[in-house]
Amino acid sequence: MIKHLAFESLLINVIDNRGKTCPTGDSGLPLIATNCVKNSNLYPVFEKIRYVSRETYDSWFRGHPKPGDIIFVNKGSPGQVCLTPDPVNFCIAQDMVAVRANPDLVYPAYLFAALRSEEVQTSISNMHVGTLIPHFKKGDFDKLQIPIPNRETQVFIGDFYLDLSRKIDLNRRMNETLEAIARALFKDWFVDFGPVRAKAEGRHPPGLAPDIAALFPEALDDEDKPVGWTSHPLSDFFDLIGGGTPRTAEPSYWGGPIPWFSVTDVPHGSDVFVVETEKTITQVGLDNCSARLLPISTAIITARGTVGKLAMVGRPMAMNQSCYGISGRSGWPPYFTYFLLKNAVDRLQSNSHGSVFDTITRSTFDGVQGVRPDQRLGAEFDGIVGPLMARILANVEESRTLGALRGLLLPKLMSGEIRVCDAENVVEAAA
């Protein structure tokens, strides 16, 4: 029989920074808000962060999280939790707390895993207050019941959950590096014109094979672009593919094997590829709507409401009408197409319009220019970055498998439905 204990009773420290906004600035120490804490990430991510001065850090806050503390969101998306890394590279804003487990009562890694379990997440959801902005009060920590198995099981669950989470996090960080390398190469070749500038100075472009270097012009023209390279609307590079939505009232159109992409499925930026979507459709659903099946390596851009979010198709899928599929026109290869689009996103967003929602239309692509290089360089670029992108896709697929395994075993272990020894065999087989 698994006992349950109050969340509050399992803690030795709760850091709550007043529920008020601290003074912020444009530089200093990162201040994470609730949007940075997501159950999909092991550690907080830095998205739309603000900064605090060292003086504010030292004097305004009641306390700061320490490595291993759990960051718990109270407001907006209650119950989202992340771990605090070592070293700690941020401070926490209002609407969240940092909690520290009492190791004499609960294995800290187990508490982290338990808080992310479906059982506890459902309990938190059922205890929300507020209709517009959900809020889980710190004062209700004593009402939240955490299942507590024996110590051996706690240790196995906690270590198992953290091991898989660390591998997923490692894949994400590896993808950040790989994507940054590919993006930097595109910028050097096609935005900053580094090889052309080197040749104009009488130098061989560093790191380039002679046959590739020969494809770059020898000088820049009066507009500071490579001689012979011309500016064209992005629509000259791309074929735009529209999406569609099967009729929602027809059950035979939904729940099939075909992923159906919407803005909620946009991957973490460095992961690039989307391989799984929240909703799926059937073949008959695809046949009865305006959506088309997008092949692998098609780019997707969200075009209505939340505009300019990018993804690349990691397995054949359809998408809704709030997106465009982007494929290279007249032989422009897929990775060149994706990074050309990525480089133009800010300008596309600036040119979006709409009375109610921001919208990117086909004419938006006509109004944004891109420099057209020798098309052979597009193929050379894809040849170089192709293995990097393939590694990113493999990491995304592996993380998806690990995440599914983690999600499958966690509730079964916590409920005692499967034993530790059986779970060990499953994990070994998956490895």
Image: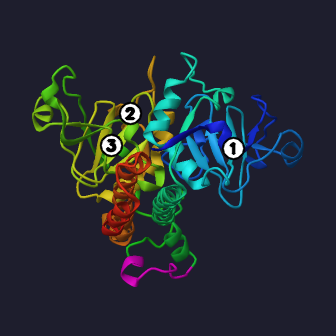
Q: Is residue 106 left or right of residue 235?
A: right
> According to the image, label 2 marks what residue?
303
- Is 169 above or below relative to 248? below
| Residue at mark 1 | 11
Q: Residue at x 19, y 42 (%)?
A: 258
Q: Nearer the viewer, mark 3 or mark 2?
A: 2
Residue identifier under label 3? 235
For marks 1 and 2 on the same chain, the one whose residue lies earlier in the sequence: 1
Task: State which mark lies toward you, 1 or 2.
Answer: 1
Proximity of marks 1 and 2: CB atoms separated by less than 8 Å: no
Between residue 414 and residue 112, name the one nearer to us.
414
Question: Residue 186 or 316: which is nearer the viewer?
Answer: 316
Asked which quadrant contains residue 22, the reply is: top right
* Magenta residues (range): 202-214
Instruction: Pick the residue in front: 308 or 273.
Output: 273
Image location (x, y in percent) of residue 311: 37, 47
Q: State left or right for residue 243 relative to residue 169.
A: left
The image quadrant that residue 57 belongs to is top right
Amino acid type for the residue under numbered disc 1: Leu
2 or 107, nearer to the observer: 2
Q: Quadrant of the C terminus?
A: bottom left
